[in-house]
Image: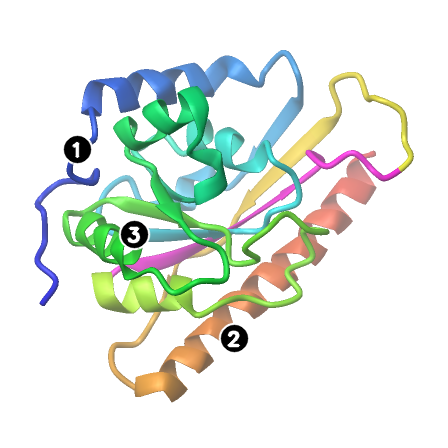
Amino acid sequence: MITATGADLPPGSWPRLHDLARWIGTWLFLPLYRLHVHHRERIPACGPVVLVANHSAFVDGPLLFGLLRRRAVFLVKREMFRGPLGLVLPRIGQLAVRRGEPDRRPLLAAVGVLRGGGLVAVFPEGTRGSGDVAAAQHGAAWLARSGGAVVVPVVCRGTRRPDGSARRWRPRVDVLVGEPLHVPAGGGRTGLTAATETVRAALAGMVRELDQLRSTAS
C-alpha cells in the first residue's frame, strides 16, 4: 500500500535548499532568453498536480523549474545524478529514474508527493527529441490516477537550436500552459491507455498552437 507523506517534497529533501534553487531559477535564464509564458495562471497554486511537458532541449527542465511559482519534483534520468549534481538533485527533491527499465521506487515516491499535495513534473517523451510529442508513456496518467492529481500539459518552444544553425543571441522562448485535465479513476489498463492518449493529444495540439503563435509573433 502507498501511504501519503503529508509533504510536497520526497523524504530526504531539504525544503530551504529547494526554495533557494527555485528562486535562483526564476531569474537565471532571463539574460539568455526572451521568455514569454502564456497562461501560467492555469497551474493550480496548490493541490496535487502532474505537469506533463514536451522535451526538446536539456534546458527545458531547469527552465520550467523556475517558472512554476511553486515547489516541483521532476523525474530526472539517473545519468544526471553524477558528480556535484548527484549531491544537489536529491536534496532539492528531484527523483532519479532509469530509462527503459522498470523502477517503481521513484514512481512510489512521486505518488507520495502527490498525495501530500505536491506537483510532479514528467517529460513523457523520455529523452530529448523534436518536441513534437510523437508518443507518450503511461507514467504520467498512472501517476495522476494513483495520486488523485490533475494533469497540466505544458509545451516549450525555442530552447532547441535548429541543427546546423549558428549560436543565437537571446532567442525567443515560449511556454504555453494548457487547461488542467482530469484522469478518471479506475478503468484498468484500458482506462489508462485512453487517459494517456488524451494527454498525448493535448500536448500535440498545444505544440501546433504554440508554433502558430510563434509564427505570427516573429
Q: Which quadrant of the rendered structure holds the C terminus?
A: top right
Q: Which quadrant holds residue 213?
A: top right
Residue 131: mark: none
**Which amino acid, by three-letter code, is at mark 1?**
Gly
**Is 76 in front, or is 169?**
76
Task: Tell me if residue 148 can be seen.
Answer: no
Secondary structure beneath disc 1? Answer: loop
**Is 194 in front, or is 5?**
5
Decide which of tag 1 and tag 3 comes sooner along the chain.
Answer: 1
Q: Is residue 82 left or right of residue 21?
A: right
| Residue span colored magenta | 149-163
Q: Is residue 99 left or right of residue 181?
A: right
Tag 2 residue: 197
Q: Position of residue 83 (x, y in %)?
A: 44, 23
Count residues near mark 1 (Cα–Cα under 10 Å), then give few for <14, some for 14-19, many for 20+.
few
Q: Position of residue 144 (x, y in %)?
A: 31, 63
Residue 12: mark: 1
**Is 98 in front, or is 165?**
98
The CA distance from mark 2 to mark 3 is 23 Å
The CA distance from mark 2 to mark 1 is 34 Å
Tag 3 residue: 106
Name the residue: 27% across, 27% down. 91
Mark 2 or 1: the one toward you: 1
Does 89 lie within the magenta span?
no
**Is 128 in front, or is 97?**
97
**Which amino acid, by three-letter code, is at mark 3?**
Pro
Does 154 lie within the magenta span?
yes
Secondary structure beneath disc 3? Answer: helix
Q: Which quadrant holds residue 152?
A: bottom left
Name the image colouring. rainbow
